[in-house]
Amino acid sequence: MSGIICFLIVVVLAKILTNFTPPDGIFQKAAEGILFANFWLLLLITIILFIADIFGAFPFPLNLPAPIIRAFGSVFCIAFILSIFQWYDSNFSTMLFQLFLLPALILIPLLFIIVLATGYFEIMRQLWWIPKVADDPDWQVVHQVPAVYLEAGESDAKSWEEIGAELRLMLYDLFHRFRQEIKRK
């Protein structure tokens, strides 16, 4: 979330600074050609990486989409870097974009696979090599519901109040566990 906020602050500051610079200056051209022209691409990159970080903060089964989302974010980052080279070529009449276009076409699938593999390696490393939560001395039980022994003749069907209480406890446990997982990272 801080990445999105910082990005928007940079855009606003660049917009304010373009009002105080000459219209044919390099800062004006760079801000309009790189930052403002690629605003939606940069916003998409920050949102994709933000979603990947959210999934990455969850414990094991829920963090599996994080490497895939992060790999797509890295591909969009390469697209933004290529647009910077294209802007540089159009303003300074160089052949830099054509020089980096072919290696980028090879680099994009390679980068996708590397980010995907390292993301899943990190998930597997957390599962196998990091000690389990139950072995952690700092881990605490938030609540413990005592077992209710049914008297003879009572039905074991749950009332709606008991179901609502269990649902609230489940949501509390989920958010508390999420908070503890974030604190560890």
Image: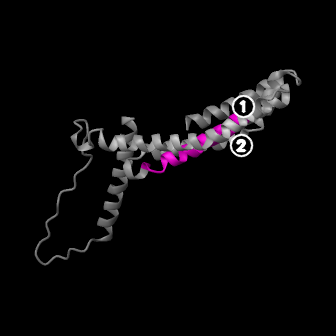
Q: Earlier in the sequence, mark 1 or mark 2?
A: 1
Name the residue tied to disc 1: 12
Can see residue 37?
yes
Quarter of the image that includes the N terminus: top right
Please name the residue shown 56% across and 34% down the image: 2
- Could one spot residue 35 in this view of the protein? no
Q: In the image shown, does 77 or 99 lie closer to the viewer? A: 99
Residue 102 vs 160, above or below: the answer is: above
Alpha carbon of mark 1 to alpha carbon of mark 2: how far? 14 Å
Q: On the picture, is 100 further left or further right than 166?
A: right
Residue of label 2: 40
Q: Looking at the image, is 13 positioned above or below residue 65? A: above
Other residues around mark 1 within 10 Å, as few (<14) / some (14–19) / many (≥20): few
Q: Main secondary structure of the magenta part?
A: helix
Tag 2: amino acid: Trp
Does the magenta-highlighted stretch encompass residue 76?
Answer: yes
Query: Is 114 within the magenta?
Result: no
User: Residue 8 sits in which quadrant?
Assistant: top right
Left or right of 88? Residue 135 is left
For the view shown, which residue lies furthest in the bottom direction? 153
Image x and y of residue 61, in percent? 39, 52
Residue at 13% x, 66% y: name it: 149
Residue type, numbered disc 1: Val
The answer to which image quadrant residue 16 occupies is top right
Q: What is the span of residues highlighted in magenta in the rendered image?
A: 63-82
* Residue at image coords 30%, 43%: 128
Q: Where is residue 77 in the image (x, y as percent from the top left)?
A: 64, 38
In the picture, the disc for residue 43 is none
